[in-house]
Image (cartoon, helix red, strand yellow):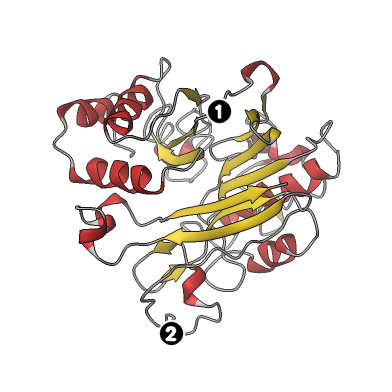
Amino acid sequence: MSRTGPGLLLRDIVQNKDPSIDAAAQVIATVSPDVLLLTNFDWDRKNRAASAFIDRLNQLGATYPFVFSRRPNTGIPTGFDIDQNGYFGDARDAQGFGYFSGHAGMVLLSKFPIVDEKARNFSDFLWKDLPDANLPYENGAPFPSSDVYDVQRLSTTGHWVVPIDTPMGAIAVLAHFATPPVFDGPEDRNGRRNADELLFWTYFLDQEFGPVPDEFVILMSANLDPNDGDGLSSIMYDFLRAGYVTDPNPARVGYVAEANIGHKGDPKFDTVNWNEPAGNLRVDYALPASSLSVVDAGVFWPNDASILGVDGNAAGRHRLVWVELSR
């Protein structure tokens, strides 16, 4: 649900000729979650693309009267040549990789009222201000420079805390969409940032940045597997076991292919279908506070087009992860 230029996603939704949009809408309508975080969804100031997609969902019987979105860090210029290629203003020179401001953002949809006035947006939080920030260095010097540290935000896309008035009471969604821990050099800039984007929630839940909601669910495309793939996997492994959240271990049902060569994790927990050498990994999460009870959880990964009437693979490489909660 992202494109290479502003307005193109809205165009494709309105024209109704893109099979990937049809597939994504059908997947969502089939599961019909009460609260849904969409990542890699282009943002625009008036939420026109999101509104058009919500209209498509309404036609399929999945009604979402409440929406929350904020300008992502993707595409916002830093003013520096971060990728050191001699040019300023490239997609890699932005606060988060982006061809334009709003590229590949996040949208939160809800069947229950979103309490906008109490939402908190930490997207402008500087990376260097994270306690024990794991900033990149090359040959002992800040990479690409110490001046970049003074403007570089931690969030690739954003970090949100969004309260929702559910039938179970107020539950806050803690949302973020991290950089992939690849596409960099020996300084491991993306790998370090990816891990620190996750660690933000550790410090947040330790009340480093203000009050913590009594009840919450972390919804995130963390781009980090606790066992396999690139990135600092141990950070995710430890986070899932630190006691802040319950890991419901959402799994696929039905046929599951064997694990990719060299993978240690159980493939039934994978949430994304990437080509080798990365392979299938668990990188998307719905993690409730440990005070909430998990009724069920799963990864919606249809293997048969007849389930949807469309090819579920066309909806994208990432699969829908869901968790059902009670008190």
Which residue corresponds to the image point at 67% horizontal and 48% vertical from the top-left? 326
Residue 192, image x and y in percent? 64, 55
| Left or right of 122, for residue 298 | left
Which residue corresponds to the image point at 66% horizontal and 44% vertical from the top-left? 217
Compared to residue 305, the image places residue 151 above or below, namely above
Q: Which mark is residue 112?
A: 1
What type is the residue that disc 1 sits on? Phe
Of 222 and 29, which appears nearest the observer?
29
Of 79 and 295, which appears nearest the observer?
295
- Say what secondary structure mark 1 lies in: loop
Compared to residue 95, the image places residue 322 above or below, namely below
Q: Quadrant of residue 250?
A: bottom right
Of 85 and 162, which appears nearest the observer?
162
Q: Quadrant of residue 123?
A: top right
- Say what secondary structure mark 2 lies in: loop
Of 299 and 136, which appears nearest the observer?
299
| Left or right of 267, for residue 195 | right
Q: Which mark is residue 261?
A: 2
Which residue corresponds to the image point at 41% horizontal and 56% vertical from the top-left? 319
Residue 309, image x and y in percent? 19, 53
Q: Is residue 193 visible?
A: no
What type is the residue that disc 2 sits on? Ile
Compared to residue 147, the image places residue 11 above or below, namely above
Neighbour tally class for label 2: few under 14, some 14-19, many 20 plus, Cα within 10 Å? few
> Are the two marked residues, 1 and 2, in contact with CB atoms closer than 8 angstroms?
no
Residue 3, image x and y in percent? 29, 36
Q: Is residue 111 visible?
A: yes
| Left or right of 60, for residue 295 | right
Going from N to C along the chain, the mark reached first, 1 or 2, is 1
Q: Quadrant of the N terminus?
A: top left
